[in-house]
Amino acid sequence: MDVINENPKTILEQWVNQFSDELYSWAFYKTSSKETAEDLVQETFLSAFNKIDTFQGKSQPKTWLFSILNNKVIDYYRKSAKTTKQTFSLTENSGFELSEGMFNAYGCWKDNEIKAIWDQDEELLDNPEFNDVMQECMDDLPQKWKLAVTSKYLSDKDTTEICQELEITSSNYWQIVHRSKLLLRKCLELKWV
């Protein structure tokens, strides 16, 4: 496709028809929000239209659009991380202390009825009801925490890359991951068991 000699509006129209579904699927996967995914895809095509004269055809249009979309997703999370409260009180938002009931007087994990469930993790992940509860618990996490967990465990990103995207130190990152796991466990104990 010779972008230089074609009408930018025609080119963009072709790209919208050709790549919208794939871009939307990726944006939805990254954000878990229909509205946000739609907005990000729209912003992607708007940016592409405004910068179409810089597209030299050295890569496929799809690659270029996905690159724009990935930058939009990163910007979205950076913006939302800055606008959300920096201090998050689990007691205030969830009605329980993060570690409440999880440790004995010696600081060791308490044995309880949910322990047997964690041994069935492969079966749990095949259970649609469990996945719905897990998604609900993930959605209850603060935005930055959710992004840290999904980047690590679903996108399998490197710690350094996640820290750069979230603009945090690695020690802060590991603290977020640890607290997220505790909160997810507590949430699953309350909503699943």
Image (cartoon, rainbow, N blue to C red):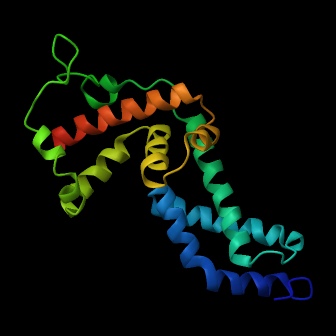
Where is 24 relative to 92, above or below? below
Where is 75 relative to 66, above or below? above
Where is 129 relative to 12, above or below? above
- Which image quarter is the C terminus in? top left
Left or right? Give the position of 20 relative to 89: right
Q: Is residue 77 visible?
A: yes
Where is 19 relative to 129, above or below? below
Left or right? Give the position of 111 relative to 36: left
Q: Nearer the viewer, residue 1 or 119?
A: 119
Left or right? Give the position of 155 relative to 121: right
The tally of labels here is: 0
- Which image quarter is the N terminus in? bottom right
Residue sitting at x 56%, y 45%: 158
Specify the farthest residue to the top: 105
Specify the farthest residue to the left: 113
Q: Nearer the viewer, residue 90 or 186?
A: 186
Q: Is residue 192 visible?
A: no
Residue 173 coordinates in the image, percent (x, y): 51, 32
Residue sitting at x 63%, y 85%: 18
Residue 127 coordinates in the image, percent (x, y): 19, 62
Residue 102 picture quarter: top left
Residue 98 picture quarter: top left
Residue 140 coordinates in the image, percent (x, y): 35, 42
Residue 44 coordinates in the image, percent (x, y): 68, 66
Specify the farthest residue to the right: 5
